[in-house]
Image (cartoon, rainbow, N blue to C red):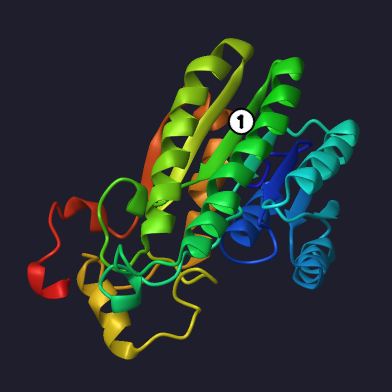
């Protein structure tokens, strides 16, 4: 098996697939031979992403869904899974949660409660509803790989990340590891990719002051942000049989940032 055929003949589902890490996962799986089922709340960008992948010869189905809307999640996943039981599913969709604790409007007593609820509605509750649907289908099929997008902010404190985002990702990690205990007996694996700073809509593509970018880079031994395409190898590994003895793992991919046990005080 090579990277180019690791997912040949298999169906891969990706949420939050229109851009950023989700599109990178889709692109990598397409290059490995997979058929794709792509979900996102942004219809226009989703179709643009699908068109790009179809141009390379990949079979792509698309579905528009807002994971913060429970009824939508149930309706769309029922439709998706009635037609396909994916061999692998990337539960990736997520949103940012505003300013980090280094900024006055990101401090614990300043964070708007509507931001807290919105972030957890998408990143945690929407993820969990998606997991319920995908896990049920895979349990019935007796096979499958689930890959969850977590974050290094879910395993350590980071001064540039919001309370809501950090809380959601720490909880996602815990749910995924709990699910690994259950799903393994059904032949279903679940693992977490925990990225550090990447150039995505949540990360570095958003406009930001140069000094903030430089502060982030000082916390990364490799002194740069990640490119989403640098997730290709890991995403195909976790979606394919090459990781058949992996479940419940949280795999950090962060340019070495998590090797630093403490961020210097002058960077807070």
Q: Quadrant of the N terminus?
A: top right
**Of the pair 160 and 72, the residue shown nearer to us:** 72
For residue 186, what is the image quadrant? Answer: top right
Residue at point 72%, 23% (across, down) = 136
Q: Name the spot of residue 243 as percent of width and height, x first.
A: 50, 30
Q: Name the spot of residue 131 as percent of width and height, x first.
A: 64, 34
Please state if 122 lies on the left or on the right of 71 as rendered: left
Q: Quadrant of the C terminus?
A: bottom left
Residue at point 48%, 58% (across, down) = 116
Q: Name the spot of residue 23 as percent of width and height, x first.
A: 65, 61
| Above-or-below relation of 84 to 35 | above
Please state if 35 lies on the left or on the right of 261 as rendered: right
Element type at marker 1? strand
**Of the pair 113 and 140, the residue shown nearer to us:** 113
Q: Which residue is mark 1?
A: 145
Residue at point 77%, 65% (across, down) = 46
Q: Name the spot of residue 44 as percent of width and height, x first.
A: 81, 72
For residue 75, what is the image quadrant? Answer: top right
Q: Is residue 17 visible?
A: yes
Q: Residues within 10 Å of mark 1 (few under 14, many from 20)?
A: many
């Amino acid at each position: 098996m090579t990277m180019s055929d690791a997912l040949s003949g298999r169906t891969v589902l990706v949420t939050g697939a229109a851009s950023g890490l989700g599109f990178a996962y889709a692109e990598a799986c397409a290059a490995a031979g997979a058929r794709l089922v792509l979900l996102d709340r942004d219809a226009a960008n989703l179709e643009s992403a699908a068109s790009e992948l179809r141009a390379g010869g990949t079979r792509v189905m698309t579905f528009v869904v807002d994971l913060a809307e429970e009824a939508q999640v149930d309706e769309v996943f029922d439709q998706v899974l009635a037609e396909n039981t994916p061999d692998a599913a990337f539960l990736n969709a997520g949103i940012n949660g505003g300013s980090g604790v280094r900024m006055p409007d990101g401090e614990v007593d300043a964070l708007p409660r509507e931001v807290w609820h919105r972030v957890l509605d998408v990143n945690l509750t929407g993820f969990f509803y998606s997991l319920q649907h995908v896990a049920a289908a895979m349990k019935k099929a007796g096979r499958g790989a689930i890959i969850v997008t977590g974050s290094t902010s879910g395993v350590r404190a980071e001064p540039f990340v919001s309370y809501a985002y950090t809380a959601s990702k720490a909880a996602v990690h815990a749910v995924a590891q709990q699910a690994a205990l259950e799903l393994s007996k059904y032949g279903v694996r679940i693992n977490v990719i925990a990225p550090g700073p990447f150039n995505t809509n949540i990360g570095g593509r958003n406009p930001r002051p140069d000094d903030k970018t430089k502060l982030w880079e000082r916390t990364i031994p490799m002194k740069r942000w990640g490119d989403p395409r640098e997730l290709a190898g890991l995403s195909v590994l976790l979606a394919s049989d090459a990781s058949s003895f992996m479940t419940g793992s949280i795999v950090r991919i962060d340019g070495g940032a998590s090797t630093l046990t403490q961020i210097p005080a002058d960077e807070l």
